[in-house]
Amino acid sequence: MNLRQLRYISEIVRRDLNISTVAAALHTAQPGISKQVRLLEDELGVPIFVRSRGRLSALTEEGARIVELANRALDEIDNIHSVGRERRRPASRTLVIATTHTQARYVLPDILKRYARRHPTVRINLRHGDPAQIAALVASGEADIGVTTGTGDNVKDLLALPYRKMKRVVIVPRGHPLLQRKRLTLKALARYPLVTYEPQFTGRRELMRAFEREGLTPTLFVSAIDADVIKTCVEQGLGIAVLSEVTYDPERDPRLRAIPAGNLFAPSTTSVLLHRRRYLQQHAYDFVETCVPAWTRAQVQRMASG
């Protein structure tokens, strides 16, 4: 058994059992990968993969356990290398943050400004995605940290640290009839077409659950992944929107108005996602501490191990 074999079986699973895709990604030959997998299976005495007509079609029960352990071993090997890199190249550091457009546009700039004063040499790389994509990027190690309202509870080995609650508001064009109402209700909102996030976003799911509890089915006219696009559609009279309060600024959005809707919709909770077993360098922990000062490296490590 060797590290190359463990990397092969891990990558095969990550790339949906497609060995040709793995070979291209790892710049090696497909027959060599197949041979190494066979050698590992022979050494262990159990098949890792189910084969059908010469192709890999599934993991065996034992194979699923083996791949899980292989991933843990590979994570620890990467952690060992990370310790060395942190000591050897302290001045050439990069922090990869996976996040949504809303967080990147409205929440992170102030945090990044404060963080940059503390770490002027760290380069920030923002990766955008929906909550599931963000969780996957952190789980795979492609991102050091995730910032999203989706907690990633369905992804194994992720730790979600909630750090900010944001109330929801109804965004309408200036002069909209809803502005004349003394009391906002879901029934009143359901009379107007909605401009909202695409289904994979937490805000869309929570919005629909609120209407469903009241037996209401609103008309979803436009779906988007970008809060700015949603607001632009509202400006054009295509509907109304329910967004986080942080997305609205009277000076920046003079053609729009925001109606508080905390009595109708639960607040959204932004969380920082970390991998429980992956080594983080000190500058990554410092970013977490910039979000919430109480989350020191020691505190986060205790939470991750617990």
Image (spheres, rainbow, N blue to C red):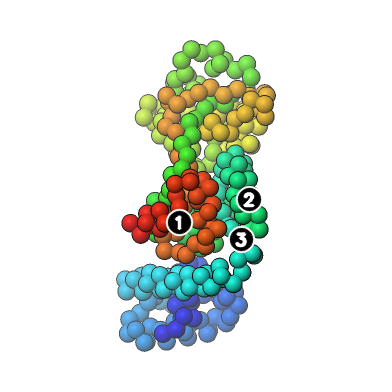
Three-letter amino acid code at the position of disc 2: Ala
Q: Residue at x 38, y 69 (%)?
A: 68
Disc 3 or 2, which lies upstream in sequence? 3
User: In which quarter of the view is residue 108 placed?
Assistant: top right
Disc 3 or 1, which lies upstream in sequence? 3
Question: 156 or 28: nearer the eye?
Answer: 156
Residue annotated with mark 2: 116
Q: Identify the mark at residue 94; answer none if there is no mark.
A: 3
Characterize the local packing of mark 1: few (<14), some (14-19) or many (20 or more) Cα atoms within 10 angstroms: some
Residue annotated with mark 1: 297
Three-letter amino acid code at the position of disc 1: Arg
Disc 2 or 1, which lies upstream in sequence? 2
Characterize the local packing of mark 2: few (<14), some (14-19) or many (20 or more) Cα atoms within 10 angstroms: some
Give the image location of residue 157, x and y in percent: 39, 59
Quadrant location of the C terminus in the rendered image: bottom left
Question: 74 or 208: nearer the eye?
Answer: 74
Q: Residue at x 50, y 67 (%)?
A: 15
Give the image location of residue 285, x and y in percent: 50, 56
What is the secondary structure assignment of the residue under circle 1?
A: helix
Quadrant location of the N terminus in the rendered image: bottom left
Three-letter amino acid code at the position of disc 3: Thr
Q: Is residue 293 above or below residue 305?
A: above
Question: Of circles 3 and 2, which is in front?
Answer: 2
Inter-mark Cα distance, 3 to 2: 12 Å
Q: Is residue 301 above or below residue 194?
A: below
Q: Is residue 223 above or below residue 2?
A: above
Q: Residue at x 37, y 77 (%)?
A: 48
Characterize the local packing of mark 3: few (<14), some (14-19) or many (20 or more) Cα atoms within 10 angstroms: some
Using the rendered image of the protein, determine whether residue 242 is visible from the camera's viewpoint.
Answer: no
Inter-mark Cα distance, 3 to 1: 18 Å
What is the secondary structure assignment of the residue under circle 2?
A: helix
